[in-house]
Image: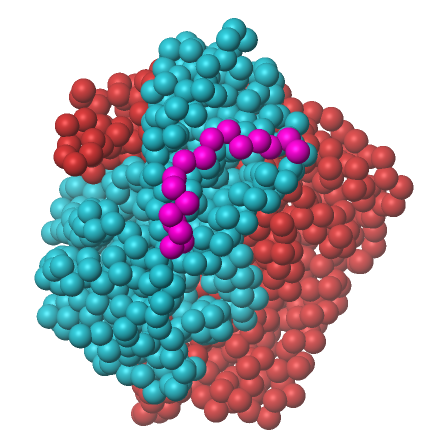
Chain colours: A cyan, B red
Amino acid sequence: MIEGKHIIGFEQIAKGESCFYAVDPVTGNKLDHRFYNVTTDEINYAISKAVSAFVLYRKKSGVEKAAFLECIADEIIALGDELINCCNAETALPKARLEGERTRTINQAKLFAALLKEGSWVDARIDTALPHRQPIARPDIRYMQIALGPVTVFGASNFPLAFSVAGGDTIAALAAGCPVICKAHPAHPATAELVAKAIQAAAIKTNMPDGVFSLLFAEGISAGLQLVQHPGVKAVAFTGSFKGGKALFDAAAAREEPIPVYAEMGSINPVFVLPEALEKYGEKIATGFSNSVTLGVGQFCTNPGMLVYKNAGKQNNFDDQLKNAFQNTTGGVMLTQNMYDNYNAGVANRLTNKDVVLLVKSGTDAGGNTANPVLLKTNFIGLKNDLCLNEELFGPASLVVEAISKNEMMAIAENLSGHLTATIHGTENDLIGYKDLLDILEQKVGRIVINGFPTGVEVCTAMVHGGPYPATTDARSTSVGTAAINRFTRPVCYQDMFQHLLPEELKNENKLNIWRQINGVQTQSDVEM
Amino acid sequence: MIEGKHIIGFEQIAKGESCFYAVDPVTGNKLDHRFYNVTTDEINYAISKAVSAFVLYRKKSGVEKAAFLECIADEIIALGDELINCCNAETALPKARLEGERTRTINQAKLFAALLKEGSWVDARIDTALPHRQPIARPDIRYMQIALGPVTVFGASNFPLAFSVAGGDTIAALAAGCPVICKAHPAHPATAELVAKAIQAAAIKTNMPDGVFSLLFAEGISAGLQLVQHPGVKAVAFTGSFKGGKALFDAAAAREEPIPVYAEMGSINPVFVLPEALEKYGEKIATGFSNSVTLGVGQFCTNPGMLVYKNAGKQNNFDDQLKNAFQNTTGGVMLTQNMYDNYNAGVANRLTNKDVVLLVKSGTDAGGNTANPVLLKTNFIGLKNDLCLNEELFGPASLVVEAISKNEMMAIAENLSGHLTATIHGTENDLIGYKDLLDILEQKVGRIVINGFPTGVEVCTAMVHGGPYPATTDARSTSVGTAAINRFTRPVCYQDMFQHLLPEELKNENKLNIWRQINGVQTQSDVEM
C-alpha cells in the first residue's frame, strides 16, 4: 500500500500539510496517491538519524554490507508486478523496459555485494617499519579507504529504478559505508516508496542501524537545497539537468564546509563517422544510430545528440540512408509533460536557425505527450555560429553535421565541451588516419565507443559513466560500475597502530585474503614481521 | 646566476616593470636579487605553452616520465651548495635541515619515478566482451586513469624544497602526465629559480615538450587568482594558510568550468594522552612533545598545536614534566617577519583569555625575528568558550588542555574540526578503554599516530597527508606519498577499441607487466581471447 509518507530510517512519518500527486504522463491527470512534502524538521530528523547510523554502519564488515545489498535485491524482486505496474503508470515506460531495468538494478546491487565480499576495493597499503633506517627510523604506516559520511542522493527521472532510489549512487554509497538520504524524484514517487520500503525491510532484516537509509518526498528545489546545505551531509549525488546539478554544486561549494557533489548533467554524446566506414557501412550505421537516438524515447543520458560525418566527396547517400532508417523509428510518451514541452520547444527553436534543416521526422503526432523523433541537419558554419546547437536536447532528436573536410571534423571535436561519451565509426584504416581525433575525444569524455552506440551503459568493473564538466561536476569518478564506490570514500592511515586495533583489512594476517600493497608490492600474503 | 625572470617552458622571460626582492628573515633587509612580478600576458603565455605541451606530455610513457623525474633529482643534486646557501639566506632554516629536505625532495622524485616504471598505478581494468550474453551482448570495456590537464602549483613557504617548486605536488602532477605552472613563493624566490632551472634543464635533457613546466614570480594574490581562473588550468594544488587556500577554492568553484583544488591549510594536530601512558611514560611523552612542537621553529603543517590529557586523579606531575622538557627547547628565526609578528600576536591574544595561562616559555628573546617557544594551558571550559583556541597558531607554541574526565576528553575530540593528524599516547590497555576515542578521531583526520608525534611525514606508498575540511579542501586525497598521483587524473574507458590503438596498459598482451583487473580479477596475465 502506498502511504505517501517519508521513510525515515525504520519509521514512516509525514507531519507536513502540503501534498503533491504523481501525474499520469499520458493524460496529465493526477494519479491516485498523494505524497507529503517533507518539512524542515523531517529533513533534520532524517539527517540526524543518518549521522547516528554512520557511527555503526561504517564499521560493518564487507560481508555484512554485502548481505544488506543482496537483501535489497531480494526485497525488490519480492515487490513483483506491483513495482512494474506502479512504475509504468508513473513513467509511461514500457513494462518490458522496466523489467530489464529492474534486472539491472538488482544485478548492480549484487555486483557491489560481490565487490564487498572480495574486499580489495579498500586499496589497502602497508609500509612496514624500518626501525634501523638512518638518519631516522621509518614508522609502520597502513592506509585504506574509509567511508565519507551521510550522502544525499537525488533520484533521476529517466531511470526510475536503476538511477533512482536503489540506483547506482545509493548502492555505491551504501557499499562504501555511507548512510543515504534519498530525495525521491516527484515524477515517480510511488515507485520510490515501494523501493524505499524494500531497502527499509532489508536494513531491518540484516540488522543495519536505524537511519542507514531514508527517503524524503518533495516538490520544488527548497528541500533539496536543505539536504545539500546540512552540515551532517558529507557528499551529494545527482543525475538530472545542468541547471539542477549546477545549483546543488554551487550550494555545496558555498557551505561553511564544502563537500563533493557528483552531478551528472547534460551530454550530447557526439558520434563521428569516418569516410571508409561511411562508404562501407553507411546503412548499418544509419540504422544503429536511429535506434540509439530513439531508444526509450531518447530519454537516456547517453543519447547521441549529434552525428558528424565527412562528405565522402563522391555521391553522398548517407543522408538518404539516415532518412530511410529514421523513418522506421517510433516515438513515445515522454516521462513528464514538462519534458515533452521542452522537447518540442527545443526542436522548434533549432529550426528557427536558417542553417538548420529538418532532415526527417517520424512518429504519428499521436498526442498524449507522445514525442515525434526528429533528425535535424546543419553544417560546420551552422554549428559554429549557434552555441545552442551544442546543448543537449532531451528526447528522441539528434543533429546531423556534415563536415566537408577532416579539418572541419577536427575543429568540431576541439570545440566540444565535456561529455559522457564520444563514438567513432571507422574502419581500422580510418582510425589510423584519425588517431588525432581519438586523442582529442579522449580529453573530452569519460567513455569512447568504437563502432557501436553510446546508449546501453554496462554495469561492470571497467565502466566510466562520467566525464569532464559540464557533463558532470567531477570528472574524477564514475556513476556506473564498481569504481563508483570511491566517490564516497577518503583515505586514512594509521601510524604504529596496535595490531588488534587495526581494521581487519590492515592487520598483519590477511584473513580477508584481499590484495594489498605491502612495501609497494601487490600481494595477497600476510605481512611478515 | 639568479636572473629574477620567469621560467616559461624553455625560455626565461620578464617583460613586466614591477619587481620585488627576497628578504633576509633575520635582519629584514632586502637580499641581492630582484624578481619581476609576472604580467597577465606572461601568465597567459605560460598556460598556453602548458596546454600545448599537455597534448604531447600526456602521451609519454611511464618510463619516459620516470627518466624526466630522475633527471630532475640529478639536476637538483648538481646545484650543490649553491642551493643550500641560497635557501638558507632566504629562509633562515639551518643548512643541515635543508640538506635533509633536499634528500627528501630527491627521494620523492625517485619514488614517483619508480611508481611510473612499475606502472600499475593507472588502475587498469578490463572487462572482456561477452558476445553471446542474453538478452544483450556485453562489449569489451577497458578503463585506466589518464592525466587531467595543466596544473597550477603554489609552493609552500615552510618547506622551500620538499613542498615547493619541485615538491610533492609538482612531482605528482608531472608523474600523472600533467604540465605544471608553479607560482614561486615570494619568501624564497631565488631558491625557486634555482630549482626551476633544474627542472627546465631536466625537461630539455629528457626530451620533454616546451611548456611542461613553468615558474612564475609574483607578490600579492592577483597573479595566483589569474592562474586559478584561466580556462587552460584543470587543477590547483596549494599549501599554505586557510585564508589563501579558501580564496583559491572559491575562485575555482566560481569558474565557468569548476576545477578541483587541493589546498592544504591549517591543522592543530591534536595529541591525546591517556591515563596509563601518562602515569608510566609522562616524562618521555613530555620530551617528545616538546621537541615536536619546536621542531623547525614550529613551522610544520603537522606541528602539534594541542595536547589533551586526563588528570590522573593522584598527584599530577605532567605539567611539571612538560615544563621541564619544554625549558630545554630552543626558539629560532621564523621564515618571515609577517609570520613572526602573527606568532607573537597569536600568543598574546590567547593570553588575554582568563582561562588560559602561560605554562612555560623557553628561548632567549634574541631578537631578529627569533620566536620563543611557548606552552599555554587551559581546561575544558576554556577551550569550549573560545573557538579561537581551536585554530592553528603557526610557530613553536602549543596549548595543553587538562580534562578532568574521559567524557571531557571525548567531547573535545567530538568538537574537533578536520585536521591532518591526531595522535594518541596510550598503552594497549588505555586504547582498549578508549576505542571510542579512536573511532571519533578516525573521522576527523587523515593520519592517526600512536605513541609517536605527528611531525615527520614519511614519503611512502601508504601515507595520507590530508584530512577533512578545513585541514584541506579535498579529503579524498593526500599531498604526500604515491597516492597523490590520483589528484591529477581521471578515469576514461574504451569500448570495443582496436587493439593497436589502445594505450599499452590496456592491450591484451601485458608487455608492461602491470597489475590489472581482468573481469574483476587482479592479475598480471595477458588477456586471453
Q: Is residue B112 above or below residue A369?
A: above
Relative to A59, is A77 on the left or the right? Answer: left
Q: Nearer the viewer, residue A28 or A21?
A: A28
Q: Is residue B165 above or below residue A316?
A: below
Horizontal and vertical percent position of residue A480: 32, 46
Numbered circles on residues, count: 0
Query: Split into 4 quadrants, where in the image is the N terminus of chain B?
Result: top right
Relative to A371, is B102 on the left or the right? Answer: right
Relative to B88, is B392 on the left or the right? Answer: left
Horizontal and vertical percent position of residue A460: 25, 40
Which residue lies at the image location 45% right of the left edge and 35% below the top edge? Answer: A361
Horizontal and vertical percent position of residue B169: 53, 44
Furthest toward the right, the residue is B17
Which residue lies at the image location 52% right of the left edge and 40% below the top edge? Answer: A418
Q: Nearer the viewer, residue B159 or B493?
A: B493
Q: Nearer the viewer, residue B509 or B108?
A: B509
Specify start and end residues of the magenta stretch as a single range: A354-370
Q: Is residue A368 above or below residue A24?
A: above
Figure quadrant of residue B495: top left
Horizontal and vertical percent position of residue A229: 48, 71
Q: Main secondary structure of the magenta part?
A: loop
Q: Nearer the viewer, residue B515 or A493?
A: B515
Can residue A13 be found in the magenta stretch? no
Q: Is residue A112 visible?
A: no
Q: Is residue B164 above or below residue A152?
A: above
Query: Split into 4 quadrants, where in the image is the C terminus of chain B?
Result: top left
Which residue lies at the image location 57% right of the left edge and 51% below the top edge? Answer: B258
Q: Is residue B148 visible?
A: yes
Which residue lies at the image location 77% right of the left edge and 36% below the top edge? Answer: B42
Relative to B499, is A318 on the left or the right? Answer: right
